[in-house]
Image (cartoon, rainbow, N blue to C red):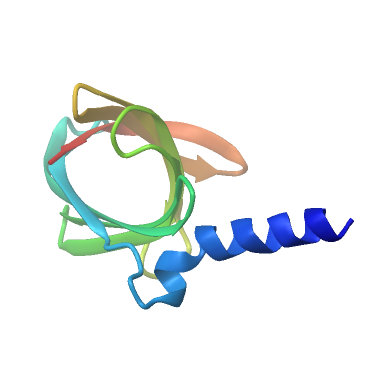
Amino acid sequence: MRRIVLIGVALATLSSGAWATGNAPEPRTLKGGFVWSQSSKGGDLEAVFTPTGEAAWDVAFHFEFRGKHVYSGTAEGSLTAGELSGKVFNEEKNRAFTFRGRFENGTFRGTHAEIEDGQEEPTGTLTLGE
């Protein structure tokens, strides 16, 4: 039993080592664009991903569409290869959007949707990369 406890403590120490030493993982900024399907308009998109755990992120999308905006929330998945999805809110927190897609060859391609009455209503596409 003592061995199990010691192994658990060692793993916890290793997994939080970067945080404990003050070397918290740095945020990653990805740039790309978005298209709003209802108007076929879009623009530049900057996404700042701040690690909160393994394959877990706080995310802030910076963009301009009828004014400058920062939609923030959380994401899960990889920033290099495979699936990535999340949920963000507008500045007033009265509108929620989901996004999902996948990274392939260093580029994320995905879709976004607004949550209305508990249902996702597709709103467009987005791309991100280094």
Q: Is residue 22 above or below residue 33?
A: below
- Quadrant location of the C terminus? top left
Q: Residue at x 70, y 55 (%)?
A: 7
Residue 51 lies left or right of residue 29; in this view the side is: right
The residue lying toward the viewer, choosing from 78 and 123, is 78
Q: Residue at x 52, y 58 (%)?
A: 15
Residue 53 lies left or right of residue 18; in this view the side is: right
Q: Position of residue 89 (x, y in %)?
A: 42, 58
Residue 113 visible in the picture? no
The residue lying toward the viewer, choosing from 34 and 2, is 2
Q: Position of residue 81 (x, y in %)?
A: 32, 28
The residue lying toward the viewer, choosing from 26 and 130, is 26
Q: Is residue 80 above or below residue 57?
A: above
Q: Position of residue 37 (x, y in %)?
A: 25, 30
Q: Position of residue 123 (x, y in %)?
A: 34, 34
Residue 51 visible in the picture? yes
Judged from this view, the residue extending furthest toward the right is 1
- Quadrant location of the N terminus? bottom right
